[in-house]
Amino acid sequence: MKLNLQLLVLVLGFSGILQAQGSQQLTDTLRHGEWVDFKRDNGSVLKALVVYPESGEATKAVIVVHENLGLNKWIRDFSEKVAGQGFMVIAPDLISNSVEGIEKTTDFENADKAREAIYNLDQEHVTKDLNLVFDYLKNDPSVNGKISVVGFGWGGSQSFSYAAQNPNLESVMVYYGTAPKDLTSLKNIKFPIYGFYGAADNRVNGTIPDTEKAMKEYGNLYSFDIYEGAGHAFMSRGAEEAYGPNTMAYEKSWKKLLSLLK
């Protein structure tokens, strides 16, 4: 009897391994991701993760702008998740090759070093990088010409700023990011801006009233959701923490994001 039980455990365990492998293979076949290099005008190389959906026709595209930690695992996972919903996704590593000898975010010694590199970037550098990936998508036959931007934290602020620089976007989704300090630049925005904020994020939320007022004055669409109990960076935190306000905000905003993109 003991031997039979051991055999049963082995069979079930082996079956579980096969199922896990099969699931991984199925996931891998749904999306294809690759790194793409872009030549900057200063001679350095911008690296970006491109994830293709499984689709037989041209799709909408999404540019994902990372937080102040760079293009880390969470942003890569999020990019794949969005692609899994039928969008072509490109996530530029904005600190790639910005420090001598360091090719991309994962090559930094630690998160603090990556954050330091982020804050050493100037606005013109970021705008030029985003233009490179936008032009790439605009000329890709697998994209139907409709391109949105989704940014988080520092990347949310960069996305808001980019909205004032590129009139050819379809929409911009700002996760707990602030508008440009020069609110007069908001008059250049030609498409909807959607905001996602945590109620416990006082620093960012304190900027919302002036942003909302300016957007109304210029006749621009700016709407937002504020999630009760959630803090700053609730998307990345909600994906890792025990179930609570950040996780609930993650789930609600994910559904809202998909409805807006689609």
Image (cartoon, rainbow, N blue to C red):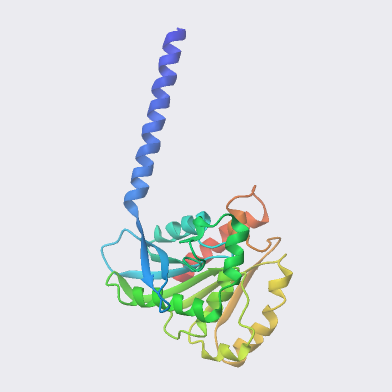
- Which of 240 and 92 lies nearest the eye of the viewer? 92
- Which of 35 and 24 lies nearest the eye of the viewer? 35
- Give the residue at x 40% y 37%: 20
The percent coordinates of residue 5 (x first, y second) are 45, 13
For the N terminus, which image quadrant?
A: top left
- Give the residue at x 46% y 84%: 166
- Give the residue at x 53% y 65%: 66
Q: Quadrant of residue 231?
A: bottom right
- Give the residue at x 33% y 53%: 30
The percent coordinates of residue 40 (x first, y second) are 41, 75
Left or right, 34 with respect to 257, comes to: left
Compared to residue 215, the image places residue 74 above or below, namely above
Compared to residue 2, the image places residue 93 above or below, namely below
The percent coordinates of residue 74 (x first, y second) are 52, 56
- Which of 7 and 107 lies nearest the eye of the viewer? 107
Q: Quadrant of residue 238?
A: bottom right
Q: Quadrant of residue 229?
A: bottom right
The percent coordinates of residue 14 (x first, y second) are 39, 26
Residue 262 in view of the camera: no
- Which of 103 and 260 lies nearest the eye of the viewer? 103
For the C terminus, which image quadrant?
A: bottom left
Compared to residue 16, the image places residue 207 above or below, namely below
Compared to residue 1, the image places residue 257 above or below, namely below
Left or right, 148 with respect to 114, comes to: left
State how many labels appear: 0
| View extreme (top): residue | 1
Left or right, 73 with respect to 52, comes to: right
Residue 49 in view of the camera: yes
